[in-house]
Image (tube, rainbow, N blue to C red):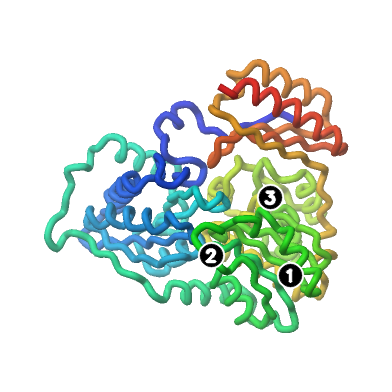
Amino acid sequence: MAYRMNMPPKEARASQKLFGTDGVRGKANVYPMTAEVAMQLGRALAFLIRNGPHRHRVIVGKDTRLSGYMLEQALASGLTSMGVDVELVGPLPTPGISNITTSMRADAGAVISASHNPYEDNGIKFFWRDGFKLPDETEGKIEELVSSGSIDSIRPTATKIGRAFRMEDARGRYIVFLKATFPRELTLEGMTIVVDCANGAAYKTAPAVLEELGAKVIALGVSPDGKNINHKCGALYPENLAKTVVKHGAHLGIALDGDADRLIVVDEKGKVVDGDAIMAICTGELVARKQLKKKMLVSTVMSNIGLERAVARWGVKVARTRVGDRYVVDEMRRNGYNLGGEQSGHLIFLDHTTTGDGTLAALQLLAVMCRAGKPLSELASIFEPVPQTLVNVVVKQKKELGELPTVMKVIKSVEQRLGNTGRVLVRFSGTEPKARVLIEGEDAARNQAYAKEIADALSKALSV
């Protein structure tokens, strides 16, 4: 199967030096994640949303990273310097900011977070007034405004300068919203659930939601100190979660990442259940309830071929997009689909929300379990993944694969040897200086060998 890359065309990349696949991201206090750039981004966003005589307002939230204080104040300064008011909500999951933005009828929302990255990193991503992430074109306009200096002279004075407020009840508003997505006729009473919040933005919201719906909750990763976000915990490190589930005889474990927009779960036996399996389970439920629009599921090129095989039993087809939950959402909106996601755990239930929401996705999965009266291990058995090997290669530069003849030669050789029994996917990360090599095929050992071949070729070609 032919390889694909997760890089925009050269002309698009030239105008987007700041934005990656999920906002601006990098090491905190090093360009582009500096206070100066954050202020410029705030000014550019403020310029774009000014569309009438009313007082404009932006919701600003963050995760629990130490650098969030610095960037929060800088971003707010940029917004207020352009005459826009700011509502600071403090630590709140990324999807919570999206929800508050729409419910408060704000003009835009901003999240200061580097998601699953270590605490040294940080990022800024924006939501439009409708709760959806900004399209590439709008990010391009912000990039142009920041780089051109064309709005530097716009300086409101006196009462036209914006104000910043602290929103005290944002967490409660979001908790109420989440609970409303769980069927009223169901309850979590009698269930024991372990939840790992990754010492991140959901450290208070996720346990509260589950407890208020009746579950006995064992909470992990709920003691953030600014440095321990994602550190050997959460969606990227479910090992401790699995041990805790087995130890306490829990019904399942829920793992979120730093900004709680993705979900990985662990069944009652301690086995990890990824985004592909969760999508398969929820697809079956929506089909049974005649609620899956157009019998289509949206996933990315990273999803296992086993997902397509699993949902085919219900006559459901899978539409694939480039990597990034924003592209999944774009495909869903463009064609009127209502379920999509990524293997990594970004799951979008468009009937309820506009972006990936780990806690909301967990509630939808729990609803399936409650209705079926079956353990998660049994529900997940409908999904049988084809062996995959994913290798990450640290690179010093990113180029089009077509410009790397030695790498292309190895890729084509591997594709020929795999034939129709597997596929090769090589792409560059949009958030880290890495190339990702995915091999999918029936023989796990062979997959590993093929992935190493391509990874070695990439290392040699992009090491300088």
Q: What residue type is labelled 1?
A: Val
The local secondary structure at tag 2 comes to: loop
Which label is found at residue 224?
Answer: 2
Q: What residue type is labelled 3?
A: Gln
Residue name at image x 34 percent, y 66 percent: 87
Q: Nearer the viewer, residue 276 or 129?
A: 276
Eye-nearest disc, 3 or 1: 3
Label 2 Cα crowd, 10 Å radius (few <14 / some 14-19 / many 20+): some
Pinpoint residue 439: horizontal percent, then vertical percent.
76, 35
| Whether label 1 touches label 2, CB < 8 Å | no
First in residue order: circle 1 vs circle 2: 2
Which label is found at residue 368?
Answer: 1
Which label is found at residue 308?
Answer: none
Pinpoint residue 337: horizontal percent, then vertical percent.
61, 54
Q: Name the residue under label 3.
A: 343
State which quarter of the image contains the C terminus: top right
Instruction: Give the Cα separation between the discs numbered 2 and 3.
Output: 27 Å
The local secondary structure at tag 1 comes to: helix
